[in-house]
Amino acid sequence: MTLDEKLKNIQMRYENGNISSYEKEVEELEARFNSDELRMCDEYQLNKLRIEKEYGKISDFDYDMRAAEILYKNASEKERNIAFLDVQRKHGVIDKQDYINKTKEINGEPYAAIKFEYENNGDGGMIVTAIYNKPFIKLLKANNYDGRSDEELVDGWLRVKLANIIQSEDY
């Protein structure tokens, strides 16, 4: 059966109500990509994903992650991981702070941020959270900070930096 005959047959089955519009699109795609080898190509896989997304079979997030897997399969691990982070950021899976931290870690760059939150327990206290990555820990160790754990290293660094701020004349 030729491709045109297969497509006409699919259209007729659709018009007769034998298959859904989703099944019609999938069958048409499979008729055009009629071998296992052709179905391994990016064009087929991306079109199949598009159909699944259009018909609510997968979420926008799943579509974007799987599309990134296809589009970046031959890229470096670094490029792939950044592409996955881009998708996670786009869909709100990670916040801006996590995105920056993880991107810098992938690039081997040290990163640290300090987050202060008011603790509403009546005494005006606050919660201080340090966000950091592995290259930052290496940097602290190289600068002679010590501790039994990463948390102790960062805590020691944070105490020194906060003490310096308090003691500075600009404060």
Image (cartoon, grey):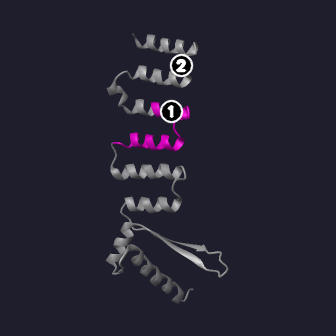
Report the span colored magenta. 47-73
Q: Which mark is residue 19?
A: 2
Helix, strand or loop at label 1? It is: helix
- Whole-angstrom CA distance, mark 2 to mark 1, is 16 Å
In this image, 82 relative to 162: left or right? left
* Frontmost residue, 96 versus 125: 125
- Residue 127, given in percent of the width and then of the height, sits at 56, 75
Residue at 53% of width from left, 19% of height from top?
Answer: 19
Please tell me how crowded label 2 is: few (under 14), some (14-19), or many (20+) other residues with Cα within 10 Å.
some
Q: Is residue 60 magenta?
A: yes
For mark 1, does the 10 Å Cα neighbourhood hold few (<14), some (14 to 19), or many (20 or more) residues? some
Relative height, residue 82 to residue 150 (above, below): above
- N-terminal of the two: label 2 or label 1? 2
Point out residue 92 in the picture as x, y percentages from the top left corner.
55, 53
Quadrant into which the C terminus falls = bottom right
Which residue corresponds to mark 1? 52
